[in-house]
Image (cartoon, rainbow, N blue to C red):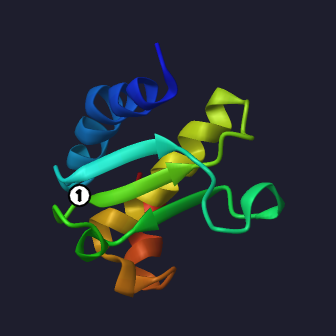
Amino acid sequence: MNRETYLNTITSKYLVPHFKAQGFDIPTNIRMACSLTSGRGAKNKAIGLCWNDSASADNTFEIMISPTIADSSRVIDILIHEVCHAVVGLKAGHGSAFKRCAQSV
């Protein structure tokens, strides 16, 4: 299984029902990849990133997880964090709506 398939499988099989049980719907327009998270390359310290759906031509949230993260439980932790951004909207930042979603899931 490649990394992107792993991220999609975890999201569809586990995260979607878990978020739903907590009252949150994960948008269906999310694309996930293991990728460097900015133009600074390997020196970048960001380990996850969620781009707003308005940034892509097909209105899809783009979630990137750094390929430097080898621990699968940490990858899932980062994925959950970034999915929370897509759920509440990136304008929410790490404010109360994000915190409520993240703590619920």
Is residue 101 something one can see in this rendering? no
The answer to whether 91 is drawn above or below residue 80 in the figure is below
Q: Residue at x 39, y 84 (%)?
A: 92
Quarter of image, res 25: bottom left
| Mark 1 residue element | loop
Q: Residue at x 29, y 26 (%)?
A: 13
> Taking 87 as reference, is 38 left or right?
right
> Taking 34 as reference, is 14 left or right?
left
> Taking 65 as reference, is 71 left or right?
right
Residue 59, how many percent across, how many down? 18, 65
- Which one is nearer the viewer's eye here, 59 or 26? 59
The answer to whether 24 is drawn above or below residue 2 in the figure is below
The answer to whether 81 is drawn above or below residue 57 in the figure is above
Residue 16, how many percent across, how many down? 25, 40
Q: Which residue is mark 1?
A: 24
Is residue 102 something one can see in this rendering? yes
